[in-house]
Image (cartoon, helix red, strand yellow):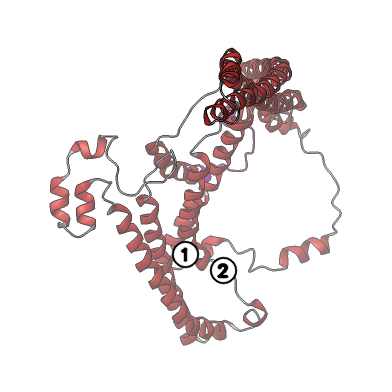
């Protein structure tokens, strides 16, 4: 299988986090009317991202997508077998290398000791029995005999290892090449099918729209609920079905609403990134060093930014068994009493995240001017006046704290997002406080 070594550039990571949610929010707000049909741009997007699985065919309700699945499964199985064969080949090659080193080391020793054996025996015979020279000669003779005996055993073991390992290595190499070829040819088959579908896709989209217009894709199935059940379901739990936009009563609420909606689209990015990681790891045998780290950093930022959104929509966990039966005024009194703990938490969170963010850009390994300002050695305007264009474009300059793995993404932007999330949460708490006071005053 072909392999590739792709590492996501830091700038592309941040541009994706900034632009993708903005584009998604715009598209979600477009006036589509009552028209619901298949779109060629979306079909091509699915073809590019999920064509190996035939997802574009499933999107168009075409069962020909099932053709892609067994071929893709063949790639996964072949790659798994290829990895097993590669491990066996590595073990066998290592055994061969170790055995060869033993032979290279022990064979000369045994040969040298064998050549000296007659001379050592003669030295023993020439000396007087019981004398010191004789005992010394006997020790030399014994060491030579032991070296021959031990060396012979090691050589025999090494030869046995070679006899077993060399055929094993050859078999493993053949298996690895066999499974690698199956995976490669299966991959080429999928590429050919995707190329054919890329040409046929406009026609497939048109036919799918024709079927949709004729109603063939939506058969009229009888409902198992009668009219009374439907009316009861529509009337039940109206508050739970309240649209999120109706929670926004002021500009602070709207800020939390837009921030929460904005970061919610990051979850879509995670789908694409983890899909890429699965393909690169199990199809191309090229796991990335950035996918997992980029996503858990992204979800950490999403968690903090969405905190104000969850507070505005009253989605946080609470003891509903006591809280839910209360009237609106009593709920406001409870919220007002517990808001003391909230503002202690929110204030502590803001101060702590601010310290984290400042420490992240104060790391000496980063840009020295910015680090000096973060440590309080120079003023803000002095820092700005000292920056040059090269400080922003030179890839060798490290801006503050970076991650410890090979991706080396700067961590200070994430920590400043934590500050933003803390500010949004604190502002939403102020908005909630105002609503509770107004509810108490109005008595409703």
Answer with left or right where residue 234 lies relative to residue 117: right
Front one among 403 and 209: 403
Tell me: 405 left or right of 213. Answer: left
The residues colored magenta run 26-42
Position in image of residue 104 (x %, y %): 57, 17
Magenta stretch: dominant secondary structure: loop
Disc 1/disc 2 C-alpha distance (Å): 10 Å
Q: Is residue 35 magenta?
A: yes
Residue position for label 2: 316
Location of residue 316 by image quarter: bottom right
Please indicate whether residue 74 sits to the left or right of residue 392 in the image.
right
Depth check, front residue: 300 or 267: 300
The numbered dot on residue 308 is 1
Q: Is residue 67 left or right of residue 362?
A: right
Give the residue displayed 48% in from the left and 51% down from the top: 263
| Residue 284 sits above or below residue 271 on the image | above
Compare marks 1 and 2 and give the one earlier in the sequence: 1
Q: Give the x, y percent position of residue 114.
A: 61, 15
Residue 347 sits in which quadrant?
bottom left
Crowd band around label 1 with a 10 angstrom C-alpha radius: few (<14), some (14–19), many (20+): many
Q: Residue furthest front?
A: 128
Q: What secondary structure is found at the residue carrying circle 2?
A: loop
Q: For numbered disc 1, what is the local secondary structure? A: helix
- Check if residue 418 falls in the magenta segment: no
Q: Nearer the viewer, residue 238 or 325?
A: 325
């Amino acid at each position: 299988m072909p392999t590739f070594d792709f590492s996501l550039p830091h700038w592309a990571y941040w541009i994706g986090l900034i632009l993708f949610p903005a584009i998604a929010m715009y598209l979600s707000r477009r006036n589509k009317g009552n028209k619901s049909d298949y779109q060629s741009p979306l079909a091509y997007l699915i073809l590019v991202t999920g064509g190996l699985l035939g997802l574009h065919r499933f999107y168009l309700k075409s069962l020909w997508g099932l053709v892609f699945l067994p071929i893709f499964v063949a790639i996964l199985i072949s790659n798994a077998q290829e990895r097993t064969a590669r491990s066996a080949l590595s073990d066998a090659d290592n055994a061969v290398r170790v055995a060869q080193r033993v032979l290279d080391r022990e064979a000369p020793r045994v040969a040298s000791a064998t050549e000296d054996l007659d001379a050592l025996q003669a030295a023993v015979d020439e000396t007087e029995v019981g004398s010191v020279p004789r005992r010394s000669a006997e020790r030399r003779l014994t060491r030579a005999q032991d070296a021959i005996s031990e060396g012979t055993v090691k050589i025999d073991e090494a030869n046995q290892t070679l006899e077993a390992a060399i055929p094993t290595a050859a078999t493993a190499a053949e298996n690895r090449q066999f499974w690698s070829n199956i995976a490669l040819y299966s991959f080429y088959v999928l590429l050919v099918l995707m190329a054919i579908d890329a040409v046929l896709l406009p026609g497939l989209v048109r036919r799918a729209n024709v079927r949709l217009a004729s109603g063939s894709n939506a058969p009229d199935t009888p409902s198992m609920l009668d009219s009374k059940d439907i009316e009861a379901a529509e009337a039940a739990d109206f508050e739970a079905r309240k649209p999120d936009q109706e929670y926004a009563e002021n500009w602070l609420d709207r800020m939390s609403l837009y921030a929460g909606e904005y970061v919610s689209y990051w979850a879509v990015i995670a789908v694409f990134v983890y899909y890429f990681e699965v393909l690169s790891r199990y199809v191309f045998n090229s796991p990335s060093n950035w996918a997992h780290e980029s996503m858990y950093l992204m979800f950490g930022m999403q968690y903090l930014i969405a905190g104000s959104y969850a507070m505005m929509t009253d989605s946080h966990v609470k003891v509903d068994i006591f809280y839910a039966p209360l009237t609106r005024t009593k709920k406001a009194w409870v919220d007002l009493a517990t808001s003391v703990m909230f503002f202690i938490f929110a204030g502590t969170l803001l101060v702590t995240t601010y310290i984290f963010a400042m420490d992240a850009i104060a790391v000496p390994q980063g840009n020295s001017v910015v680090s000096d300002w973060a440590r309080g050695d120079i003023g803000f305007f002095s820092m700005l006046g000292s920056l040059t264009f090269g400080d922003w474009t030179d890839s060798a300059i490290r801006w503050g704290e970076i991650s410890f793995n090979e991706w080396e993404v700067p961590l200070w932007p994430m920590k400043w997002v934590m500050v933003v999330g803390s500010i949004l949460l604190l502002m939403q708490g102020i908005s909630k406080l105002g609503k509770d006071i107004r509810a108490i005053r109005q008595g409703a």
